[in-house]
């Protein structure tokens, strides 16, 4: 099995056109399920060891337009992980207290603790995406943020946090179908927000902002992955495999037990 290539060279401009949103990595949906299922079980086992080791953390950043599948990806990755060893953090519009601080203040507090896998549903990247597209801060301010993000992520990786960043790449047509489904299905309506339509109207501005964020913040210490996500099963397969491989590379170990336990027996 050869999954789509998700990375691009640091320093190069990302070419989103090179990533086909409908990519299948040569697999059929039914073939992908047992593979993805196996990976989530391995993720669960490795997460358990990471928790026992209690020395390092894994941060997974999920970005993508509305309906790109961030919630679905979270459900998939966390399927087999002990709830105590995970943190899922959604980033919404900042509160007035948060706005009174620098943009990374609220983010730093939510970095996963040692032993944990943390997933950011949106992240500090909103501060160079929605904030840029809707002119919420000056151009000078958002332009200076890419470098601060790189430095912040460097600080984190230097303190034992491995960072994985996923851009869930869907087409405008796929978003249309998913938004329509949210309107048509009474059980999905709660997910629909009229604000999503305003954002959809600015699709091209968002794509341009994504290209810049991916390009300028694609570092060796915290690389971006572009995940072709029109097909939900493909999205899950690719993300699961990358999370699994990353945990395998981290190779967490159970801590050594206390000494002299061998002779102990219980009545
Ligand atoms: P949802 O992910 O659908 O729950 O929506 C969360 C909303 O909060 C999205 O519209 C985001 O763009 C918005 N949001 C997240 N972070 C920021 C930020 N730093 N500034 C402004 N809006 C934000
Ligand atoms: Mg929403």
Image: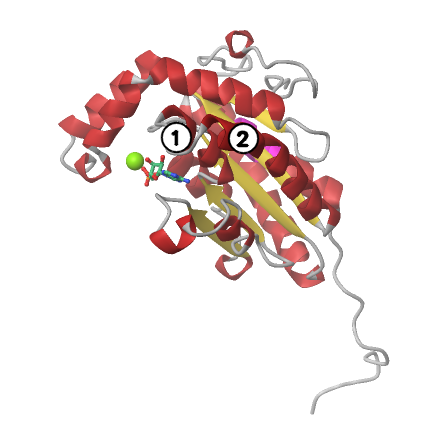
Check contact, mark 1 vs mark 2: CB within 8 A. no
Which residue is found at the position 62% from the left and 52% from the top? 47
Distance in Å between CA atoms under marks 1 and 2: 17 Å
Q: Nearer the viewer, residue 61 or 45?
A: 61
Q: Nearer the viewer, residue 216 or 68?
A: 216
Magenta span contains residue 238: yes
Q: Earlier in the sequence, mark 1 or mark 2?
A: 1
Q: Position of residue 263 (x, y in %)?
A: 84, 83
Which residue is found at the position 21% from the left and 25% from the top? 181
Q: Position of residue 261 (x, y in %)?
A: 81, 80
Q: Position of residue 119 (x, y in %)?
A: 51, 45
Which residue is found at the position 23% from the left and 24% from the top? 197
* Quadrant location of the N terminus in the rendered image: top right
Q: Position of residue 139 (x, y in %)?
A: 47, 26
| Occupied quadrant, residue 131 | top left
The residue that disc 2 covers is 166
Q: Secondary structure at mark 2?
A: strand
**Quick check: 251 left or right of 176?**
right
**Quick check: 192 left or right of 79?**
left
Tell me if residue 87 comes above or below residue 16 in the rendering.
Answer: below
Q: Main secondary structure of the magenta part?
A: helix
Q: Which residues are magenta?
A: 237-243
Residue 262 shows in the view: yes
Q: Nearer the viewer, residue 263 or 244?
A: 244
The residue that disc 1 covers is 130
State which mark lies toward you, 1 or 2: 1
Q: Does the residue tagged 1 have its C-beta within 8 Å of any atom of ligand 1?
A: yes
């Amino acid at each position: 099995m050869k999954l789509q290539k998700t990375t691009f060279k640091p320093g190069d401009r990302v070419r989103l056109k090179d990533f086909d949103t409908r990519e299948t990595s040569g697999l059929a949906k039914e073939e992908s399920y047992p593979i993805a299922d196996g990976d989530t079980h391995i993720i669960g086992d490795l997460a358990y060891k990471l928790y026992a080791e209690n020395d390092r953390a894994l941060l997974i950043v999920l970005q993508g337009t509305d309906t790109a599948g961030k919630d679905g990806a979270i459900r998939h990755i966390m399927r087999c992980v002990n709830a105590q060893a995970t943190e899922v953090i959604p980033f919404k519009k900042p509160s007035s207290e948060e706005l009174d601080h620098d943009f990374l203040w609220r983010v730093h507090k939510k970095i996963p603790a040692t032993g944990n896998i943390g997933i950011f549903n949106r992240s500090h990247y909103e501060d160079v995406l929605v904030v840029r597209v809707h002119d919420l801060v000056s151009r000078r301010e958002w332009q200076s943020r890419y470098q601060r993000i790189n430095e912040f992520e460097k600080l984190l990786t230097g303190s034992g946090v491995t960072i994985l960043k996923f851009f869930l790449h869907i087409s405008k047509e796929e978003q249309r179908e998913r938004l329509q489904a949210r309107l048509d299905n009474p059980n999905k309506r709660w997910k629909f927000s009229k604000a999503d339509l305003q954002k959809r109207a600015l699709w091209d501005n968002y794509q341009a902002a994504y290209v810049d964020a991916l390009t300028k913040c694609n570092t060796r210490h915290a690389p971006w992955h572009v995940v072709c996500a029109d097909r939900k099963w493909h999205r899950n397969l690719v993300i699961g495999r990358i999370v699994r491989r990353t945990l395998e590379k981290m190779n967490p170990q159970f801590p050594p037990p206390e000494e002299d336990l061998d002779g102990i027996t219980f009545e």
